[in-house]
Image: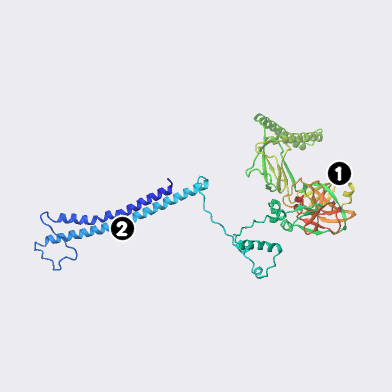
């Protein structure tokens, strides 16, 4: 039995109870009145209880009258019976309303549960009851099937011979008195069936091209780049013209600190490194000149320390005796060989003092390592508790605002022709452009090359010591013709060859392999591979590189 049928059965029984309950409650008021009258009237006599309309209109009897007592009692019983009837009627109405409400709620709940179970069974497939479907009427089809008023008003064309014969044949049959027969439907023309177009599914690539603008490579090697992608990647072009410029000289070098702003802190004795009260600085910390960076506590045993103290005490005693002897010798003028003895005693006194000076550092409690300049900690080997050797570098301090570039030149004539104060440009592998000034070069040769020093004007933030930098120094005598172009327009192809992108049409770009020569850190000279007047991409070259 389904849930819907069970719900309807319960609702039907609830309604029957609601209908019978008022009849049962209606019998309560008369029964209560009879019971009240029987209790008030003695069994030997019958007393009729008057209603409200039958009550006497005369004034009530005096309190001393004895016969009025039974009538007053009967009136009180009647009022009690009426009150009981009104209460029973109210109870009847409230009970019937509550029963009807409960019955309707139960019916609604069971009906909803049944409908939910029915739909759930239909969704999971266990309910095979077919659903009723209404036929869809297309109003457009009705409009298309409606005859054209202009066509209906136009005169009809005269029928051909075949149509006239076909119309005459049914008429002859009708005249003969025989019923007309339906003509067979004409067979479809095979040529028309072959001429009907065959619908094919839409290719996904064609649909994607309709929704989005995509680049593609043409058959001639050029690339199609739609305007939407050009605007997205901010592609900009510029025309190139041929000019004559002085050829630049590229010098490979590296970033080095300024000798006047570079300091190294070394340990002066064998000892254990201890942090100061302010803490030990780490890489990147800014320090000031004279700041205590670390302390070195000498590492000497107890026995060795006692021996050093005894030796220092002996040397101090001998130094005192020798110094007093020299003073006494200087007071007596008639001592034989006085001058020679004084010189010998003076030499011996200097030797004793040097021996004691060599032993005194071993008795020091600690050595403070101080910063010699203002700068930043570039390198450090300081670790709390590590034993440092005498002469070992513990801290390396560099001022990042005073940096140089040390370049090496294989041709010594370049260094000889360069003048002090000549400005040039340098370029780092990260693409940073540096303005440098030539400082000078030394006569010594290092690895068959002459070192040249360039001072960096206003070093950028984040420039590291030791990073490679290529200095582009303008030539003094040589001049060369070519197409100057910004360095950002040069890209490297998949084969490692430098190339530029020329815009031949609004949405067509062609790559060209070129040969370049550096002019400065931002400009290159195209020597071959590109024609004068070509429009070359100078911004957004990364998009063109992705096309390949």
* Residue highlighted by disc 1: 449
* Residue highlighted by disc 2: 93
Q: Specify how the rendered protein is coloured.
A: rainbow
Looking at the image, the residue that sits furthest to the top is 303
User: Which residue is at the front of the view, 46 or 436?
Assistant: 46
Q: CA distance from mark 1 to mark 2?
A: 120 Å
Asked if one can make out residue 334 in the rendered structure from this viewpoint, the answer is no
Does residue 64 appear to the left or right of 418 in the view shown? left
Q: Residue at x 31, y 58 (%)?
A: 93
Q: Give residue 200's position: percent from left, percent from top.
A: 69, 52
User: Which residue is at the front of the view, 146 or 15?
Assistant: 146
Q: Is residue 275 above or below residue 199?
A: above
**Rendered image quadrant of residue 353:** top right
Q: Earlier in the sequence, mark 1 or mark 2?
A: 2
Count neighbours of disc 2 (C-alpha within 10 A) and say few if under 14, some if 14 to 19, many if 20 or more: some
Image quadrant holding the N terminus, namely top left
Q: Give residue 233's position: percent from left, percent from top.
A: 73, 56
Count neighbours of disc 1 (C-alpha within 10 A) and say few if under 14, some if 14 to 19, many if 20 or more: some
- Contact, mark 1 vs mark 2 (Cβ under 8 Å): no
Q: Give residue 399's position: percent from left, percent from top.
A: 73, 49
- The mark total stands at 2
Q: Give residue 368's position: percent from left, percent from top.
A: 68, 41
Does residue 321 appear to the left or right of 11 in the view shown? right
């Amino acid at each position: 039995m389904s849930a819907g049928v069970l719900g309807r059965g319960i609702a039907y029984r609830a309604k029957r109870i609601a209908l019978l309950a008022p009849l049962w409650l209606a019998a309560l008021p008369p029964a209560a009145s009879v019971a009240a009258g029987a209790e008030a009237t003695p069994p030997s006599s019958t007393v009729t209880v008057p209603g409200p309309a039958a009550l006497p209109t005369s004034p009530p009897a005096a309190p001393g009258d004895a016969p009025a007592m039974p009538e007053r009692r009967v009136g009180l019983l009647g009022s009690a019976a009426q009150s009981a009837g009104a209460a029973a009627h109210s109870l009847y109405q409230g009970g019937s309303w509550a029963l009807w409400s409960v019955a309707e709620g139960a019916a609604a709940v069971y009906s909803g549960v049944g409908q939910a179970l029915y739909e759930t069974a239909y969704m999971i497939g266990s309910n095979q009851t077919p659903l009723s479907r209404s036929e869809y009427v297309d109003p457009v089809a009705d409009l298309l099937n409606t005859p054209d008023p202009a066509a209906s008003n136009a005169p009809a064309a005269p029928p051909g011979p075949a149509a006239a014969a076909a119309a005459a044949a049914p008429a002859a049959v009708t005249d003969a008195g025989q019923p007309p027969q339906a003509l067979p439907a004409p067979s479809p023309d095979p040529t028309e069936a072959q001429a009907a177009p065959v619908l094919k599914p839409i290719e996904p690539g064609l649909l994607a091209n309709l929704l989005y603008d995509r680049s593609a490579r043409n058959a001639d090697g050029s690339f199609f780049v739609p305007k939407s992608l050009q605007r997205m990647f901010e592609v900009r072009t510029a025309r190139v013209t041929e000019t004559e410029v002085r050829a630049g000289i590229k010098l490979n070098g590296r970033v080095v600190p300024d000798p006047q702003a570079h300091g190294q802190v070394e340990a002066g004795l064998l000892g254990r490194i201890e942090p100061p009260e302010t803490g030990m600085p780490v890489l990147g910390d800014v320090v000031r000149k004279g700041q205590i960076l670390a302390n070195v506590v000498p590492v000497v045993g107890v026995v060795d320390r006692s021996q050093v103290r005894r030796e220092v005490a002996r040397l101090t005693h001998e130094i005192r005796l020798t110094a007093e002897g020299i003073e006494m010798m200087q007071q007596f003028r008639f001592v034989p060989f006085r001058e020679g003895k004084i010189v010998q005693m003076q030499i011996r006194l200097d030797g004793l003092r040097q021996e004691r000076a060599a032993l005194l550092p071993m008795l020091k409690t600690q050595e403070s390592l101080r910063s010699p300049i203002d700068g930043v900690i570039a390198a450090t080997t300081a670790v709390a508790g590590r034993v440092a050797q005498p002469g070992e570098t513990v801290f390396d301090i560099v001022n990042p605002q005073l940096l140089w570039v040390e370049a090496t030149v294989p041709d010594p004539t370049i260094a000889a022709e360069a003048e002090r104060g000549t400005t040039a440009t340098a370029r780092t592998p990260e693409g940073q452009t540096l303005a440098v000034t030539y400082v000078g070069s030394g006569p010594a040769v290092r690895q068959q090359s002459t070192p040249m020093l360039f001072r960096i004007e206003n070093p950028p933030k984040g420039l590291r010591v030791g990073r490679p930098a290529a200095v582009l120094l303008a030539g003094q005598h040589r001049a060369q013709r070519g197409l100057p172009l910004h360095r950002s327009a040069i890209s490297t192809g998949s084969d490692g060859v430098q190339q530029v992108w020329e815009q031949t049409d609004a949405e067509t770009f062609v790559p060209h392999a070129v040969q370049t020569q550096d002019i400065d850190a931002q400009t290159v000279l195209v020597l071959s591979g590109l024609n004068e007047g070509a429009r070359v991409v100078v911004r957004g070259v990364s998009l063109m590189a992705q096309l390949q």
